[in-house]
């Protein structure tokens, strides 16, 4: 079985989030503590809100792993929502309290959230039926699944790292070596530049006081991936297309770029393309990596560099102008509590999404029933 596949399910205030990952080889070592550490990171970061004080995400592995090793069968992951105990009477699968459901109904639809369009599409008058699934809470289980994909890649010597490049206009213009990226996870903001980080915290504080929210930009990098993953043969096989799809699939992501990204539009060919050299010892190599490690939709052996832009969170405590879905009257959009900034979490989530895509591309090309077989095939490339 060589096709990796991830399916997630779960509502934000429902009983639990679950994921099924199919196609992992047997004998892959799974460290639950490492997955829990990623989950804890996803919950942290400067600007997070009240919900994270309730949740304490830990993964339960329900199937597919025995004594720390995969069996080759589908792996089922589960994270229980602690907040469910406050919502059971209106979120359980049956016997809900109609009064509580009415009380928890959301009709003052939030601009920028899925509320209005989702209600129009799925014929609801209560946006709770939309927002519960649209919520970025779902990213918790994707991060847990990302732990499995990272285990698969780590066994091959492929590493993923990243950091926050911008928080609502406060930018870090510096460049960093891959080994420096680890430090980002020990910071409050995910930023490596201390001056920028302090300014970003001030920005977040000011936005919080104004009842407003922040987005930002994250950079994710992949080191150690050999050339030839992905394919130019069909557009759907292109590695950059797949990465863009997975990253755009994360809640609140509005843009993705590789290497020089959008800047290529304003530069000449000589300033954009990475010239190719050859040395007996090194083989083919490039002295620059403006392509971000992908040419023709295939990894070229250089570091993969991808950046994504996250829009500001659409639940604003000050409330934006909107229209009540039922009454069709102008009103202020709903807000009970909100994160001000979740860009630190976005970096962790983006790493998980990148891990999924890279692991899937590797599995497709190399197949393999056991982790040792995959490794042997990878090393032979
Ligand atoms: C979210 C709204 C907030 C966030 C949530 C995403 O939840 P609540 O409505 O319960 O306050 O905290 O994110 C998470 C719960 C999480 O774990 O990341 C939304 O509407 O997208």
Image (cartoon, grey):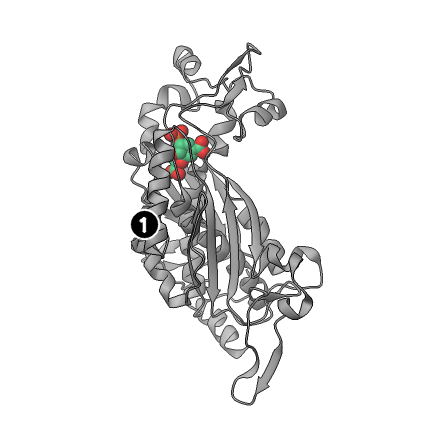
Q: Residue at x 36, y 65 (%)?
A: 180
Q: Residue furthest right?
A: 233
Where residue 142 sits: x, y (%)? 45, 46
Where residue 94 sits: x, y (%)? 43, 20
Could you tell whether 246 is left or right of 343 in the image? right
Q: Which image quarter holds the C terminus? A: bottom right
Q: Which image quarter holds the N terminus? A: bottom right
Quadrant for ligand 1 reads top left
Residue 301 versus residue 127 in the image, above or below: below
Could you tell whether 66 is left or right of 234 in the image? left
Q: Nearer the viewer, residue 233 or 378?
A: 233
Residue at mark 1: C-beta within 8 A of ligand 1 = no
Q: Residue at x 40, y 41 (%)?
A: 342
Where residue 78 sits: x, y (%)? 38, 42
The residue identified by callout 1 is 36
Residue 212 versus residue 242 in the image, above or below: above
Where residue 351 sits: x, y (%)? 45, 54
Q: Residue at x 53, y 79 (%)?
A: 380
Q: Nearer the viewer, residue 352 or 287?
A: 287
């Amino acid at each position: 079985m060589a096709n990796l596949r991830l399916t997630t399910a779960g509502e934000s205030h429902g009983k639990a989030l679950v994921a099924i990952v199919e196609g992992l080889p047997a004998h892959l070592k799974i460290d639950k503590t490492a997955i829990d550490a990623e989950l804890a990171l996803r919950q942290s970061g400067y600007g997070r809100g009240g919900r994270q004080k309730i949740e304490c995400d830990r993964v339960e592995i329900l199937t597919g792993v025995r004594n720390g090793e995969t069996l080759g069968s589908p792996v089922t992951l589960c994270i229980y929502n602690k907040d469910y105990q406050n919502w059971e009477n209106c979120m359980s699968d049956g016997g809900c309290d109609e009064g509580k459901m009415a009380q928890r109904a959301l009709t003052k639809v939030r601009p920028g959230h899925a509320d209005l369009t989702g209600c129009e599409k799925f014929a609801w008058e209560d946006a709770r039926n939309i927002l519960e699934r649209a919520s970025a809470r779902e990213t918790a289980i994707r991060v847990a699944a990302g732990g499995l994909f990272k285990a698969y890649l780590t066994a091959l010597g492929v590493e993923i790292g990243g950091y926050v490049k911008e928080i609502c206009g406060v930018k870090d213009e510096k460049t960093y070596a891959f080994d420096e990226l680890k430090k980002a996870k020990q910071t409050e903001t995910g930023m490596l530049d201390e001056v920028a980080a302090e300014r970003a915290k001030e920005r977040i504080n000011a936005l919080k006081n104004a009842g407003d929210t922040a987005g930002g930009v994250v950079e994710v990098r992949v080191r150690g991936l050999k050339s030839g993953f992905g394919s130019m043969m069909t557009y759907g096989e292109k590695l950059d297309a797949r990465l863009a799809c997975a990253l755009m699939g994360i809640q609140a992501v509005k843009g993705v770029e590789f290497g020089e990204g959008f800047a290529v539009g304003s530069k000449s060919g000589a300033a954009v393309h990475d010239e190719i050299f050859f040395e007996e010892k090194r083989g083919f190599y490039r002295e620059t990596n403006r392509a971000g490690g992908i040419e023709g939709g295939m990894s070229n052996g250089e570091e993969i560099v991808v950046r994504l832009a996250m829009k500001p969170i659409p639940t604003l405590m000050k409330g934006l102008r909107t229209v009540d879905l039922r009454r069709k009257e102008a009103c202020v959009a709903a807000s009970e509590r909100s994160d001000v900034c979740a860009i630190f979490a976005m970096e962790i989530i983006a790493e998980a999404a990148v891990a999924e895509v890279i692991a899937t591309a590797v599995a497709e090309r190399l197949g393999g029933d056991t982790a040792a077989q995959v490794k042997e095939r990878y090393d032979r490339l």
